[in-house]
Amino acid sequence: MTDTPTQLFIGGAWVDAADGATMAVDDPATGEILCHVADAGPKDAQLAEDAAVTAQEKWARTAPRARSEILRRAYEIIVERTDELAHLMTAEMGKPLAEARGEVAYAAEFFRWFSEEAVRIDGGHATLPDGRNRMLLSRRPVGPCLLITPWNFPLAMGTRKIGPAIAAGCTMVLKPAPQTPLSSLALAAILKEAGLPDGVLNVVTTSRAGEVCEPLLRGGRIRKLSFTGSTGVGRLLLAQSADAVVRTSMELGGNAPFIVFEDADLDKAVDGAMVAKMRNMGEACTAANRFFVHTSVVEEFGRRLAERMGALVVGPGTRDGVDVGPLIDRNGRGKVEELVADAVERGARVLVGGRTPEGPGCFYPPTVLTGVDPGSRLMDTEIFGPVAAILTFDDEDEVVRRANDTPWGLVGYVFTEGLDRALRVSERLEVGMVGLNTGLVSNPAAPFGGVKQSGLGREGGRVGIDEFLEYQYLAVPVG
Ligand code: NAP
């Protein structure tokens, strides 16, 4: 912690906020203050934008191999420092160290992946159908970007945006979530060490997100917004981006259905449920939010899931043997408590958990609810906590209709041993990603993203870099 930067990173230098403001970073396991970091205001954001705009032209002309090698070096440094970064992440975010190490590996992989993509940006050449003109097609960086990230994956949500932006030749202003600024600041230090030129990445930590970001979006110099966070904030930022017609990528909230058919392998389904529900204490956009289980297997599934959930050890993420750390803050836990209370009032049965423990920290126990009423609030709210809500269904058409009956469409999970049904149901689900007999879909080599109000665009995979590139077409007469 002692070496972790706590200032703003602007134009390659570590600086205080212009007005000297700082904000506290809390440890969610104890509620105590870990440290203070600079709290940027609009003036700092403008300086960060100046630095990004100034660096853009030269950076766009940098050889793709040079950009690739910076990412590759940063990948190697991150992997080398896995333990240090994992401890930092656990301190500010709360996830158990084993999960934090997993996130460091996942985050680093975006840099390795995009170091490989940086040298594969291609164009095209064709004689047009009229035979009189040639078309030369090239791809250009979109320009200075504003990147806004949430607190739930403090390192990976950054690298998933910074990796393709560097590969494409874009400069950036990154605004991380105020709960977890330290991982982003550590990442900026690593990129500087890896040789990233000054001004290419600028980081503004702030408790005044709206005041800091809105002028950048409306000002006309930022050409791209890449946002990960809730659908409500995404909608607001889309509106703010409209004035200057800023290109946007939106990775928003989810409300994932987890469907267990009568022919599912229940061992696989319960294993899948543990991952889809409990990764990151349930604080993931991909978290299974609604478990639809066929009436004929619901009792067995519920019993087995409750047994596994009840065996998980809850405690501070730094303690050996802990499976479930604290939730991010009191607000986050309060929301989970309210959603469970509402479901229970409407008749849900608590198979395990459901009671907030006494003492400091924002802990909440792994909880399984069964017999959940479809009108319960948690059916159309992201629970963002370790609560599995089970409902029943009787036939395929019915479950597909209910799974799709939501404004979100990020991911769905389907458990069945029938190939025809697996493909048919997956194709009918209105989602950007499907986990078929698995509870984990995230992978840097696959396009991550949703449909409907879960977002616009994709991150990762071969297409991830497209979000940061524009086409330019040159018309050249055939001589
Ligand atoms: P959030 O409240 O929407 O905040 C996300 C980021 O936006 C934070 O940095 C936040 O800063 C900032 N922000 C909020 N209001 C803003 C404004 N007016 N202008 C500029 N920035 C603003 O979401 P969260 O609670 O941090 O994260 C949880 C949400 O993220 C969930 O809905 C989850 O599903 C979603 N998520 C989606 C994905 C995906 O890939 N689809 C991945 C991870 C998380 P402040 O906190 O200071 O307001």
Image: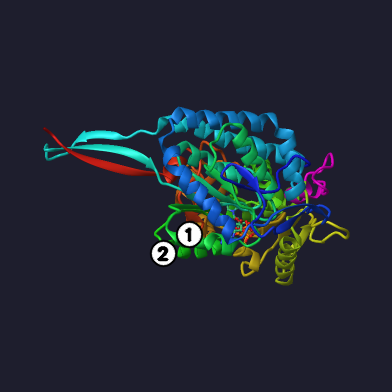
Where on the image, by quarter, is ligand 1? bottom right
- Does residue 469 appear in the picture of this structure? yes
Q: Is residue 332 magenta?
A: no
Q: Which mark is residue 217?
A: 1
- Which quadrant would the N terminus be assigned to in this image? top right
Q: Is residue 368 left or right of residue 263?
A: right
What secondary structure predominates along the stretch shown in magenta? loop
Distance between mark 2 and mark 1 Cα atoms: 8 Å
Q: Nearer the viewer, residue 450 or 164?
A: 164
Answer yes or no: is residue 94 visible.
Answer: no
Residue pointed to by mark 2: 243
Name the image quarter holding residue 320. Answer: top right
Query: Identity of the amino acid at label 2?
Result: Asp
Q: Is residue 227 left or right of residue 88?
A: left
In the foreground, 392 or 375: 375
| Residue at point 64%, 39% (across, down) | 189
Q: Residue 135 lies in what quarter of the image? A: top left
| The C terminus lies in quadrant | top left
Left or right: 371 in relation to 447:
right
Determine whether the residue tagged by mark 1 lies in a helix, strand or loop: helix
**Residue range of the region highlighted in magenta in the rendering:** 305-323
**What residue do we see at 45% from left, 52% from top?**
224
Residue 306 belongs to magenta span: yes
The crowding category of the residue bearing disc 2, from other C-alpha atoms within 10 Å (few below 14, some 14 to 19, many at least 20), is: few
Query: Relative to the observer, which residue lies in front, 420 or 35?
Result: 35
Residue at 73% x, 55% y: name it: 328
> Percent position (x, y) of residue 337?
75, 65
Label 1: few (<14), some (14–19) or many (≥20) C-alpha neighbours in 10 Å: many
Q: What x and y, as percent, mark residue 211?
A: 57, 64
